[in-house]
Amino acid sequence: GQQVMQIPQYQHVQEGEDFTTYCNSSTTLSNIQWYKQRPGGHPVFLIQLVKSGEVKKQKRLTFQFGEAKKNSSLHITATQTTDVGTYFCAIRGSGGSQGNLIFGKGTKLSVKP
Amino acid sequence: GAVVSQHPSWVICKSGTSVKIECRSLDFQATTMFWYRQFPKQSLMLMATSNEGSKATYEQGVEKDKFLINHASLTLSTLTVTSAHPEDSSFYICSARDLGGRSSYNEQFFGPGTRLTVL
């Protein structure tokens, strides 16, 4: 079935360092979404990318969608302790209009103060 | 964003008993809700798509007779874990899209989750 590969699984950084997580698909995607899940919490929507080569920024977060629409990345500049959590990419499943999501395995970010 | 609630937030039960989890969209109507389970340190796995007024659509490998889903109204879906066993212990999360407007990106709004522990 459809799936999306996400790496790395874990990332430990010193506060102030940058962080990047990557998602890859073997098929062309119509769009990709990114979610953040804080420890003990539930996923919260961050952004959706739709266009080939799209780049979107949210403060220190930069989201990119590859030219071939098969990969995406989330980059955090100068991490802070508030960035701690697991970041998931998600793609639309084959359920079509029902809109079910298929999640990557997630990248767990820990930030050392 | 739109608000989704779940009840209970955590439950401990004995093996062989059934547990019902409620998912409610508080400020919007949801014809479709999704049920996920998440094991510790793992990703979210879609279990089923709950459709108001019709049968749920289950993902491959999910037993429909064990995980009963009822979407009785536009704001409520329930998941009943029947004859629960320790291997059913997990974090169950529901989500919904607000097709009325706030899901401008077709994003899903997640409930806070229910942690089930089966002894």
Image (spheres, coloured by chain):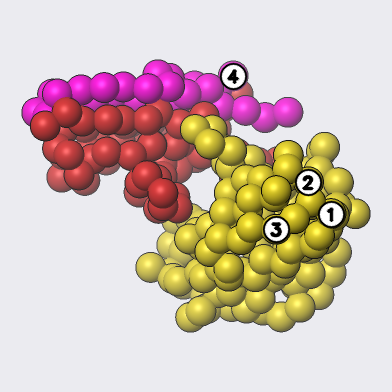
The reply to whether the C-beta atoms of the residues labelled 4 and 3 are less than 8 Å apart is: no
**Disc 2: which residue:** B85
User: Which label's residue is closer to the chain start, 2 or 1?
Assistant: 1
Q: Three-letter amino acid code at disc 1?
A: Gly
The reply to whether the C-beta atoms of the residues labelled 3 and 1 are less than 8 Å apart is: no
**Disc 1: which residue:** B16
**Disc 4: which residue:** A26
Residue A13's image quarter?
A: top left
Q: Which residues are magenta?
A: A1-26
User: Which label's residue is closer to the chain start, 3 or 2?
Assistant: 3
Tag 4 and tag 3 share a subunit: no
Q: Three-letter amino acid code at disc 4?
A: Ser
Chain drawn red in the picture: A
Q: Which mark is residue B13?
A: 3
Q: Nearer the viewer, residue B41 or B84?
A: B84
Give me the chain letter of mark 1. B
Left or right of A71? Residue A94 is right
**What residue is shown at x 31% (from left), y 30% (from top)?**
A109
The reply to whether the C-beta atoms of the residues labelled 2 and 1 are less than 8 Å apart is: yes
Say above or below: A113 vs B88: above
Q: Three-letter amino acid code at disc 2?
A: His
